[in-house]
Amino acid sequence: MKSTHPGWIAGITWLFQVAIAVLLLQTLFFKLTYTPQTQVIFESIGGRPAATLTAFAELVAAVLLLVPAGWLTRIDPSCACSAREIRGWTDFKGWVGYASAIGAAFSLMVIGGAIATHLLIIGIVIPVAPGSIETDGGTLFALALAIAAMAATVTWFRRRELNAFGHAVLNQLPSHKALAA
């Protein structure tokens, strides 16, 4: 989607998207290999299957954040982000043009789960290994807050794209078409 924001806002948005993706991708190794600190984090919320599922969700979010508009479907870059201009899936030209906005919202949901887990279950400061007295000093929680702030910013600046995507999806539902007729 062509950005309707000033260049510096579009630049900050992309910088945040890349930063979020890099941070999410770098944690995949730890979750997929189930390192000692990952064991501490996930032992009370589902163990290795929960860690693998979380890694998959983070991978999806990171990939979506990095997909530029029109990369796969050659979406017209002059296409406006207005829901009024989207009348159906054929006019929508595919979801890929909205991947970054969807990725930002999805990463905000994933990291929101991590923050809630820290606050409600495992605590802000966690041991680096099972039975260890050495802790991370709250580094992982602070990192989750930073990712959440960046994801919220990107989601805010891409809110029109999310709105347009939602309208395009709704236009495909049979019940929505019946109401419009």
Image (tube, rainbow, N blue to C red):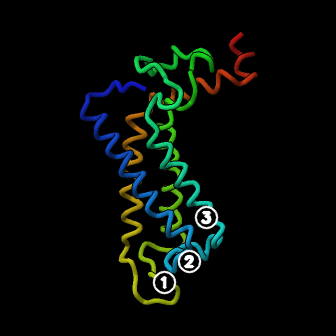
Q: Earlier in the sequence, mark 3 or mark 2?
A: 2
The alpha-carbon separation of the residues under discs 2 and 1 comes to 7 Å
In this figure, which residue is indicated by the disc labeled 1? Answer: 129
- Percent from the top left, x then y, of residue 55? 56, 60
Q: Amino acid at mark 3?
A: Thr
SS class, disc 1: loop
Q: Nearer the viewer, mark 1 or mark 3?
A: 3
Q: Position of residue 167 (x, y in %)?
A: 58, 24
In terms of image quadrants, where is residue 154? top left
Asked whether, in this view, residue 27 is left or right of residue 138, the answer is right
Q: Amino acid at mark 1?
A: Ala
In the image, is residue 118 above or below residue 106? below
Residue at mark 3 to residue at mark 2: CA–CA distance: 12 Å
The residue singled out by tag 3 in the image is 52
- Residue 118 placement (x, y as % from top left): 49, 68
Instruction: Return the residue nearer the eye: 74 or 26.
Output: 74
Residue at horizontal 55%, vertical 72%?
A: 33
Q: Residues within 10 Å of mark 1 (few under 14, many from 20)?
A: some
Could you tell me the amino acid type at mark 2?
A: Gln
Q: Position of residue 23 (x, y in %)?
A: 40, 58
**Quadrant showing the N terminus:** top left
Query: Helix, strand, or loop for circle 3?
Result: helix
The reply to whether the C-beta atoms of the residues labelled 1 and 3 are less than 8 Å apart is: no
Tags 2 and 1 in contact by the CB under 8 Å rule?
yes
Q: Residue at x 68, y 23 (%)?
A: 172
Q: Secondary structure at mark 2?
A: helix
Return the mark for residue 39. Answer: 2
